[in-house]
Image (tube, rainbow, N blue to C red):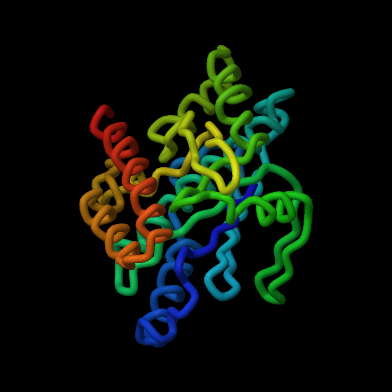
């Protein structure tokens, strides 16, 4: 499972912002991603491996998991795929929020989440595999700051995981827990270039969470702060920029409304 992301409006950033500030921002946030506390997927019999790398503004967050077949039996592969998706969703939500809500310049990201095989070696910047190809092919299609699930990843979340979560088994109980407080807006009409919107699940940058010192789960960033950051990221007056800002704002309205219902 992986997320393939790129920044909107990154061209010309070196003239608009202090270069050291841009570099410091990426260095800090990618370090945070690599050190992320994967508490949402902590479970006996489950090992989760997260990787992250970037090339210029392109960021890839990838995850693979290993579930104990003696514990989860025939559902082991499903548990592995769901755990990887949950980890990618939580970490990606935190990165998206951090890109607009932390140190300047604010950067709005778009991209896709793909299910499939991949090979990633950050030491030599090597990215290979069908999941990489599928994600890269579609990551620039969204007409706004959307990181959306491609059909196979969306089907995993909305069909296979939902069905398994109703089962009275160790796998079913774990999947129910994994999918609680997931930073995702489901069944959202994502505006795509050259076509009608595609209804799918979208990562919610307002819904990133962290584990507090008292063990409670808290929002990683104030939603208002994140929204102001998106507004600053879309500060240009060009029609294309304002159109992307408008559809992103509409999505954030829905995303914030879902948080308020929790």
Residue at the (41%, 40%) spot, across then down:
183
> Residue 251 vs residue 178: left or right?
left
Where does the image place residue 209, in percent across and percent down from the top left? 34, 47
Residue 184 visible from this viewpoint: yes
Above or below for 170 versus 192: above
Residue 69 picture location, percent across and down: 72, 31
Where residue 92 appears, x then y in whole percent?
48, 52
- 190 relative to 174, above or below: below
The residue under the point 68% across, 75% down is 123
**Is residue 50 in sight in this rendering?**
no
Name the residue nearer the viewer: 189 or 202.
Answer: 189
Location of the C terminus (image quadrant): top left
Q: Position of residue 255 (x, y in %)?
A: 34, 38
Front position in the image: 225 or 81: 225
Q: Quick one: 126 or 178, which is closer to the camera?
A: 126
Residue at image position (40%, 43%) is 204
Name the residue at 39% across, 61% down: 241
């Amino acid at each position: 499972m992986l997320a393939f992301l790129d920044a909107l409006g990154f061209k010309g950033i070196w003239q608009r912002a202090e270069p050291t500030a841009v570099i410091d921002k990426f260095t800090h946030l990618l370090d945070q991603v690599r050190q992320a506390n994967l508490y949402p997927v902590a479970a006996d019999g489950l090992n989760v491996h997260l990787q992250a790398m970037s090339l210029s503004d392109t960021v890839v967050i990838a995850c693979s998991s290993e579930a104990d077949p003696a514990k989860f039996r025939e559902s082991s592969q499903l548990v592995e795929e769901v755990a990887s998706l949950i980890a990618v969703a939580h970490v990606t939500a935190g990165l998206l929020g951090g890109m607009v809500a932390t140190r300047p310049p604010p950067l709005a990201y778009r991209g896709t989440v793909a299910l499939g095989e991949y090979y990633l070696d950050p030491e030599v910047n090597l990215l290979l595999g069908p999941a990489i190809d599928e994600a890269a092919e579609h990551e620039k299609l969204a007409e706004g700051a959307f990181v959306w699930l491609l059909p196979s990843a969306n089907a995993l979340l909305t069909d296979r995981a939902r069905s398994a979560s109703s089962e009275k088994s160790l796998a079913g109980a774990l999947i129910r827990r994994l999918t609680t407080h997931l930073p995702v807006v489901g069944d959202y009409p994502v505006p795509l270039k050259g076509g009608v919107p595609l209804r799918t699940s979208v990562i919610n940058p307002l819904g990133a969470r962290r584990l507090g010192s008292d063990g409670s789960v808290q929002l990683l960033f104030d939603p208002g702060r994140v929204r102001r950051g998106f507004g600053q990221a879309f500060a240009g007056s060009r029609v294309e920029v304002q159109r992307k800002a408008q559809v992103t704002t509409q999505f954030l309205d829905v995303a914030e409304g879902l948080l308020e219902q929790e």
